[in-house]
Image (cartoon, helix red, strand yellow):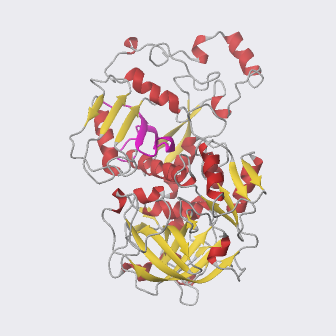
Amino acid sequence: MTDVRAQLDALREADDLIEIDDRVHWVDTAAAVASEAARENGPAVLLTDTGGDARLVGGALGGPDRLAVRSRQPWSRVAAALGLGHGADYLTVLDALVAARRGGPRPALTDAAATEAGVDVRSLGLPAIGGSDAPVITLGFAAVPAEQSRGGESDGPPAQSTEAPNPADRDQGRPGVDDVNWLPVRGSVHGSDELRLSVPSAPVRHAADGTPVSIVLGPPPAALVGATMRWVGDSQVASAPRVASALGDVPIAPTAAGPVPAASEVVVGATVTAVTDAHPDAIDTPAVTEPTAPAGPRAPWEDAVETTSIRARVTSVRSREDPVIPVSPTGAPMSDGRCLLSVIESARLYGRVNNYWGVAPVEWLALPAETGLGICLVASEILYAGFEWQLANTLFSFSRLFDKVVVLDTETAPMDLGRAFDDVWVKAHPANDWEFSDSEAPAATAPQYRRDGSTGANVYVNAAWDPRWDEEYIAPRVTFEATFPDELREAVRTDWAALGFDHGPEHEPGRRRRKTSENSEGTPENSERTPENGEGTPENGEHTSESGRET
C-alpha cells in the first residue's frame, strides 16, 4: 500500500522533496511557499511548522512543466504515489489508470490509523488560499452514504463491479464498501465546527439534513484518484473504493458515513445541515456566491462536473500521530490539483478513443497542465483521409474541458511538449490544417475566457502528415541514430552523462519506446516499439531539417 507517508519516502529517495523547518504559518505563508515552489518547478515541499497540529506538503502530486528538458515529468509524482515508480513513463501511467476504471477486489476491512482525538478541525492548520483567512480543503475527499444520497434516483453514472455486494462488509449497520460514495471535495472551515463544501451534484442533491459525511484528509493517493475518476466524465467506471483497490492495496475502516481508507491521516466526521440546489451554470462561473459556498479559488476538478455546495457541522476529528496533509496551491500553474486532473482526464479519453472504432489508433493523449487543460494533444495514426476531423470531433463530444485539439503524428513523444507545438508550426498549414467550427459550440470550462457561458468556436489543428502522401515527399528527420556514424554514436553513448546530456532515462540515446496495443476489451497491453524518430537524441531531443520522419 502507498499511503501519504510512503509517498513522501519515495519522493525523498528520488531527491524530489525538501523539508522546511522554519515557521511557515498557515494563515499567510504556507500557500505562498507551495505556490512559488510549483511556479518555479521546484521539488515538493514539506512544511513541518505551520502553527497548526498538522504538517503540510505541497506539490506531492504536482510536477514541473515541460517547457524545458528536465529529469522529472509532470506525472512523475503521481506515478510514484501510485506505486508505479518515480521514473515511470507516461504510457505506463495511462495504462494503469485505464485498467483501474474496471475496479479491483473488495478492499479488506481493518482498524483506522487515525485514532488521536482532542483536536478541532481549525487547529489542524490547513492553509488559507486566495486571499481568504479561512482554512481551505484542497486535496481530500468526502464520503457519503450512497443509499441516503439517491433519494430514489440515480446518483450518477452506474458504478461497475465484478463482485456482488457482501453483507459482511457492513459494520454494525453502517454502509459497506458498495454503499458509499467517495467524492472529490473543496471546502473551507468557518469557526471551530462549520464546514462549507463543494462536491459533485449527483450524489448529494437529495441528501437530507443530518446525513453523515466524512471528510478524509491525507488519504492514500490511490483513493484520491478513485474519488476523482469516479465522477469526472460520463463514461462508466467502478466505484471509487474499487478503483483505489485496483491501483493498490487500500484497506478500509468504518465511519458513520461509510468506510474510508484506514491509512488516512485525518478523518473529520460531520453531518449535513444545508444543501443548495445544483447549479447548472456553476461550471461556467468563477465562484458560487451562495452562503454555503466554500472560500478560496475553485479546484480544477470543478470545471469537469456539475457541483453543489453543502454546509456541514463537525462532530468529530481523528488523526494519526503527527499527521501530514497534502495540499494543492490552487491557482498555481502546475498545482497538484491541475496535474492530477490532467492525468486522470487524459487516461479517460485515451481509453475511450482507443476503444471507440474497434482499433487502437491513438499512441498517447494529454491535456497538458501547462496549457491549463484547455488544449488536448493526441498523437494518433491517421487511418484514412479525414480521420483527424473525426477524431477531433469525437474528443470534443467526450469532454467539456477544452476547445482546442491538436492531432500529432505518433512519432512525437509525450515528454517533448516543445516538439509537439513545433509540429504545429512546421506541419499545419494555416489555411488548410486549422479547422474552426461554427460559433455555436458550448463554452469549454477549463479556459479562462468565455466564462459567462456564451457559445463560440472549437478548433482543431492537424499537425500530422497526410496519409495519402508518398514517403518520398516527406523530408527525413535529422536524428541521432540516422545522422552520425556508428563510431561517434558509440562514443557519445559511453560518455553520455559526462557530456551533460543526462536529462533522464527517457532521453538516453537509442532508447526504445513501448507500444501499447488494445486487447478485445480495450485494455492496453505492454510490448516494445522502435521509434521511427530515434527518440532520445543528445541535448534537447530531436532536430529537424524542415519537417519529416525518418525513412
Horizontal side of 187 relative to 2 (left or right) equals left
Q: Say which residue appears at 48% left-offset and 42% top-offset.
A: 368
In this rendered view, identify the residue nearer to me: 418 or 194: 194
In the displayed structure, 465 sits above or below 22; it is above
Task: Identify the image quadrant of residue 439.
Answer: top left
Q: Quadrant of the N terminus?
A: bottom right
In front of the other: 420 or 83: 420
Reply above or below: 251 against 474.
Answer: below
Note whether residue 59 is visible. Answer: no
Task: Name the one closer to the observer, 298 or 98.
Answer: 298
**Residue plotted at (76% across, 20% down):** 494
Q: Which residues are magenta?
A: 355-384
Determine if the magenta segment contains residue 522.
Answer: no
Whether residue 536 is visible, yes or no, is yes
Rendered location of residue 122, percent (x, y): 62, 74
In front of the other: 380 or 219: 219
Relative image position of residue 190 (x, y in whole percent)? 54, 75
- The answer to whether residue 515 is left or right of residue 50 is left
Residue 214 on image: x %, y %: 55, 77
